[in-house]
Amino acid sequence: MLEFSLNRQDFLEPLSKVVGVLEKRQTLPILAHVLLNVRRDQLVITGSDQEVQLEAQIDATMDGFEVLEEGLSAVPGRKLLDIVRHLPPESVLHFKQTEQHVVLRSGAFESQFSTLPAEDFPRFEVNDESISQVDLPGSDFKAMLSKTMFAMAHQDVRYFFNGMLLELNGDLIRLVATNGQRLATAQYALSSSADISSRPVVPRKGILELAKLLDDSAGDIAVLISENALEARVGCFRFMTKLIDGDYPDYNKAIPAGGDKVFECGRKQFRDALIRTSVMSNEVYKNIKLSLSSDRLMLFTNNPLLEQAEELVEVDYSGEDIEIGFNVNFLIEALSVMDGERVQVELSGETSPCLMVDPEDQGARFVVSPMII
């Protein structure tokens, strides 16, 4: 029979992030609930969809936090968040569990939440064997995720494409994502070398939720990998996700090498030209033709309505002429996650994929397969 009080401002952000992992349509009623675990020294809020789980820990030593009685209770997550979000900023929240409900009082407001048995809340079982751990700045890890997660597949029959490879090898961590038509990689050199070699495949939902948890102001993140799960600890949050059972294909075979037709241009200029031209592309195939000649790149697209668009982009190039087609969205998305002012594009032939590299970040690579125009 839990009972505790705390300030709204200390409760809202942790609750909001925990509720974010809940699915809007649940197969089990308990999955629409968050678990409140009240202890003498802290409050732990937990949300789960049975694939990912997020815990937020609120220290009981914070000003305004008072624990009157320890206990566990599962309450409706989104209803609780909607109420707390619309209470005055300086509100004090008082929770008390009765026989049938959890009662929330704040000033003149009072509400009663129906509860489900805490013992029915799903437990995330983690195999502690073979745990590997790496620590790195949260902002750097978020940047790596941003440069790669857009390339993950969605509901692909090749289940390992519906996730991301997290490759640990000594003092290097590398992320790899692909849907079979495009690929993105990013890497980070760890501050200390370790005898670590691991290649877990993290599911799409886990990657998306982990990215939301991180921001530029985050401190270091600790990433722990076991046989069946990945765990990330950042600030007061403990995030866990199941892993995809399977071996990720050898992505190195998909990265072209030795392209003899290499051009360089302004990244933003190239991206904006693609965006403008794409308006007239086929709505289904999103096709665009690139015609490369000496210091010139012509973009051309059309659609079944006989509409078309073209634009000339100035590039640094002195090789042979080549025409090649791509899905324009794949090019735009890769260019959008790069940071540098320039982009280098390597081509081999009309039927070979292109490799895009940010000259200021050689650890990030983007591959896009061609399409027939």
Image (cartoon, grey):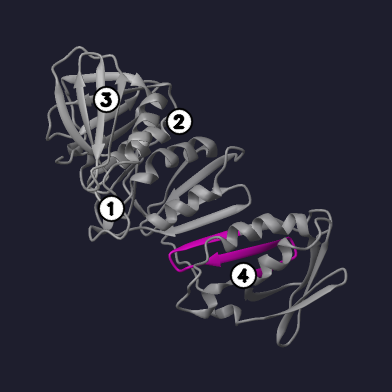
- Location of the N terminus (image quadrant): bottom right
Q: Is residue 306 visible in the rendered structure shown here?
A: yes
Q: Magenta stretch?
A: 34-55
- The residue carrying mark 3 is 345
The residue where tag 1 is placed is 161
**Disc 2 to disc 4, C-alpha distance:** 40 Å
Taking the view exactly as shown, the residue that stands out farthest to the top is: 318
Amino acid type at mark 3: Val
* Residue at 36 percent of width and 29 percent of height: 273
Q: Is mark 4 on a helix, strand or loop?
A: helix
Badge 2 or badge 4: first in the primary sequence: 4
- In space, the residues marked 4 and 1 are separated at their CA atoms by 31 Å
* Residue receiving disc 4: 77
Residue 152's place in the image compared with 328, above or below, is below
Membership of 219 in magenta stretch: no
Q: Which amino acid does label 4 sit on?
A: Gly
- Pointer 2 local density, CA inside 10 Å: few below 14, some 14–19, many at least 20: few
